[in-house]
Image: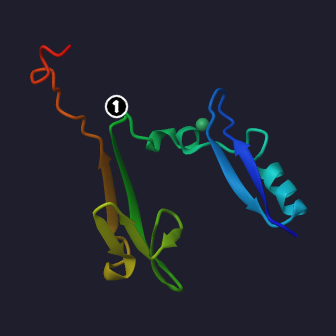
Amino acid sequence: MSKSIVRVTCGHPGCNEFARYEADNRKHSIDLYVRYGNGKWKCVRHSQPDEVLSSDNCKTVDEVKVIKHSQGLYWGKEKGFSGFAHGPGFKAFAKDFPPGTILRVTAEIIAPPHRHAQESGHE
Ligand SMILES: [Zn+2]
């Protein structure tokens, strides 16, 4: 059986973002379509709008905590998801810290400086 691609578009009215899922067979492609098709899938802009930075939403702060599991220490909220957290400019191993330690991640958009002064007289 050859693999096929299931393409679904964002359920938000007017949004053209889409996702592609690889299906192993016909049944899998139908399962994927039932799960994500017909507007059930939403792009990150429409599923997590609070986390999408913009000029109106120029700063986000999120926190994960070191949580102790039977298999070790993980970063997470209620449930641990990973022993290693990373982003631009940082990496953090949960096992390097005691349980309850918080990793606070701040992302901030800084607009470029206004350039009207240097560009006066163009055109
Ligand atoms: Zn969308």
Locate residue 21 relative to residue 108 in the image: left or right: right
Foreground pick, 5 / 111? 5
Locate residue 103: give its quadrant. Answer: bottom left
Q: Residue at x 16, y 26 (%)?
A: 115
Q: Residue at x 33, y 56 (%)?
A: 105
Taking the view exactly as shown, the residue that stands out farthest to the front is 123
Query: Mark 1 vs ligand 1: CB under 8 Å?
Result: no
Q: Residue at x 63, y 34 (%)?
A: 16
Foreground pick, 60 / 117? 117
Q: Residue at x 61, y 39 (%)?
A: 17
- Which SS class for mark 1? loop
Locate residue 99 relative to residue 37 in the image: left or right: left
Q: Quadrant of the N terminus?
A: bottom right
Locate residue 10 relative to residue 79 in the image: left or right: right
Residue type at numbered disc 1: Ser
Classify 10 Å Cα crowding around label 1: few (below 14), some (14-19), many (20 and above): few
Callout count: 1
Image quarter for ligand 1 equals top right
Compared to residue 122, the image places residue 31 above or below, namely below
- Rendered location of residue 52, percent (x, y): 44, 41
Q: Quadrant of the C terminus?
A: top left
Compared to residue 65, the image places residue 13 above or below, namely above
- Rendered location of residue 39, percent (x, y): 74, 38
The residue at which mark 1 appears reads as: 55
Locate residue 117: give its quadrant. Answer: top left
- Rendered location of residue 122, percent (x, y): 17, 16
Foreground pick, 93 / 10? 10
Compared to residue 74, the image places residue 55 above or below, namely above
